[in-house]
Amino acid sequence: MMASSSPCLVAVFVAIWIQFLSISASTKSIDAICQHVTDKRFCIKTLTAYPPAASATNTFQTVSAAIHIAESYAEKCRKFTEKTAKENPKMKEQFMDCQDAYHRIVMSLRSAAGELKVSPDTSNYDVMVCTDQTTMVKDLVGKNRDVASNTIMKMTLMMNKLIAIAAAATDLLFPTEP
């Protein structure tokens, strides 16, 4: 009886050990990313709550996940600004400009994800230029006091946090410091 249960015990132990190593790999990558972000607590909370980042088995997967989080949120912002432009004729042009800015952010982050393996430095640049667009959004609606503009500003501040995470992530593959 003991001999037949021994291989099962070994298999269970190996499965648990592999899972532990996977969690350890993703935790190390998440910690490495979040070391370079101003809001470390937000960074860790965001990445550990996102299954592709939390279950990543290597740094590349964690970096890809960080970019994807930012891209998904940018798309959400783009859709919101599009809807807001349709619902607010007096400020339609401002909100359409915000929509265009978020569209450019989405495209830059998609480019960053696509360049990650081939050219990490280009990927890093693609993420970094997204802040030009968030600055434009802030300039467009930051002084407005209407509910829609305030919501867009809150979304833009969140977008900046996610861009910072994605930028720190791409830095892991292309360190900017010697």
Image (cartoon, helix red, strand yellow):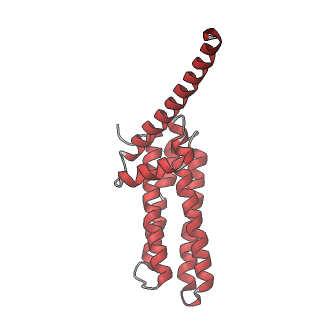
**x and y percentages locating residue 47 in the rendered image:** 48, 49
* Residue positioned 46% across, 68% down in the render: 156
Note whether residue 174 is visible: no
Residue nearest the observer in this picture, 12 or 26: 12
Dividing the picture into quarters, in which one does residue 19 lie?
A: top right
* Residue positioned 49% across, 44% down in the render: 121
The answer to whether 167 is drawn above or below residue 81 in the figure is above
Residue nearest the observer in this picture, 31 or 1: 1
**x and y percentages locating residue 33 in the rendered image:** 42, 44
The residue most toward the bottom is 90
The residue most toward the top is 3
Q: Is residue 32 left or right of residue 49?
A: left
- In the picture, the quarter occupied by the N terminus is top right
* Residue positioned 62% across, 78% down in the render: 83
* Residue positioned 43% across, 84% down in the render: 144
Note whether residue 163 is visible: yes
The answer to whether 163 is drawn above or below residue 113 in the figure is below
Dividing the picture into quarters, in which one does residue 64 lie?
A: top right
